[in-house]
Amino acid sequence: MADFFDRPSPGESLVVEPKSRPYERPAEMSKLSEVIDFYISRITSDEVIDNTIEMLDMGVPIEVLVESMTTFFVMQGKHSMDNKMLISPVLHEYVRMLGKQAGVQVVDGLNPDSQPQEDATHLAEKVRMEIEKVAETEEDDEGVDLMRQTADMLDDDLEQAEPPLEEMPIEEEPMPQEMPTPEQMPNPEMGIMSRR
């Protein structure tokens, strides 16, 4: 599980050098066609495609895979958040097609007819166990980096999930107050601050 304290402090961006983060500078790719070509060539590379299919087979939802991949590259300054929003549906369909061609029952949270989604904690644990197996070999490549990003995304989704609503306490109705007697009523001829 991700360390809660291993995060930026509130206001940290105000004390670092302006434009020092990759996502604060102009993106490397600005054309939508460039961004799509970048992702298609990346997903279909020998290093990444096997890990992508493996995660789909584990039950990782397509939208989590796409979100982890695109968020990572926005943070790296490869493309803008606007392009991320535009290409996400295209990548979603492409990854779904890859899973279908590989004969994998994909979990598609955007499609109600899809398989039910597993618990995020359990999925993150499965992905991390697979990463440990691969880390012992020489196959620690870009595909394994994608697995790490996806496991982190699953952990973040779990942390950001709202806690279950507790039962609201029943508020008692306020007791009706008695009407003031004429002696208790303020005299309109006297001021608010005057003595009685």
Image (tube, rainbow, N blue to C red):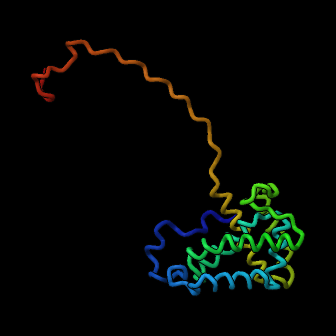
Answer with left or right where residue 18 lies relative to residue 85.
left
Pick whichever, 26 or 143, lies toward us: 26
Quarter in which the N terminus is drawn: bottom right
Percent position (x, y) of residue 175? 42, 19
Outermost residue, right side: 103
| Residue at point 82%, 76% (across, down) | 51
Which image quarter: residue 41? Answer: bottom right
Measuring from the top left, give residue 153's x and y in whole percent.
68, 66
Q: Is residue 56 left or right of residue 91?
A: right
Q: Residue at image x 55%, y 84%? A: 27
175 w.r.t. 48: above or below? above
Residue occupying the point 79% across, 82% down: 44
Please count the marks in the image. Answer: 0
Residue 77: name its quadrant: bottom right
On the rendered structure, is 150 left or right of 190?
right
* Viewport quadrant of the C terminus: top left
Q: Residue furthest left?
A: 189
Q: From where the camera sits, is residue 118 visible?
A: no
**Does residue 189 sit above or below 138 in this rendering?**
above
Q: Is residue 192 above or below residue 111?
A: above
Closer to the camera in the image, 98 or 178: 98
